[in-house]
Amino acid sequence: MSDTTITGDNDNALRAELERLRQEHRDLDEAIAAMDETGKGDPLRKQRLKKRKLLLKDRIVALEDKLTPDIIA
């Protein structure tokens, strides 16, 4: 197996993980919005969802940085 294949497989795995994280981030956003709209829900649960959403955002940014080639300007 060549290095390009390994790199390509790794990129594909990272892209799949990135899409999964983005979907989870969207789902949390919708859940938080629903809690806001209904006025229902435990404030502590909402706070935990927001914290999870921020952690996901950090992970998404890190993966995007890994997938973006370094450009020397």
Image (cartoon, grey):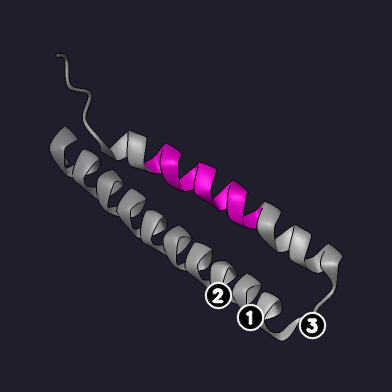
- The residue lying at 41 percent from left, 56 percent from top is 17
Q: Residue lying farthest bottom?
A: 38
Q: Residues within 10 Å of mark 2 (few under 14, many from 20)?
A: few
Q: Would residue 48 appear left or right of 32 to someone viewing this image?
A: right
**Amino acid at pointer 1:** Ala
Q: Residue 24: x, y in percent?
A: 51, 66
Instruction: Look at the numbered discs 1 and 2 and tell me whether their residues touch, using CB distance below 8 Å.
Output: yes
Q: Would residue 72 appear left or right of 39 to someone viewing this image?
A: left
* Circle nearer the N terminus (3, 2): 2
Q: CA distance from mark 1 to mark 3?
A: 9 Å
**Amino acid at pointer 2:** Glu
**Residue 48 vs residue 13, the one in the foreground:** 48
**Residue 13 vs residue 55, the one in the foreground:** 55
Query: Label 2, on which residue?
Result: 30
Instruction: Look at the numbered discs 1 and 3 and tell me whether their residues touch, using CB distance below 8 Å.
Output: no
- Check the image and report above or below for 61 versus 23: above
- Check the image and report above or below for 29 versus 59: below
Which one is closest to the eye, mark 3 or mark 2?
A: 3
Q: Residue 65: x, y in percent?
A: 35, 35
Determine whether the residue tagged by mark 1 lies in a helix, strand or loop: helix
**Amino acid at pointer 3:** Lys
- The residue lying at 85 percent from left, 73 percent from top is 42
Query: Label 3, on which residue?
Result: 40
Classify residue 10 by image quadrant: top left
Determine whether the residue tagged by mark 3 lies in a helix, strand or loop: loop
Q: Which mark is residue 34?
A: 1
Q: Is residue 53 magenta?
A: yes
- Please provide the residue range marked out in magenta: 52-63
Q: Residue 44: x, y in percent?
A: 85, 63
Q: CA distance from mark 1 to mark 2?
A: 6 Å
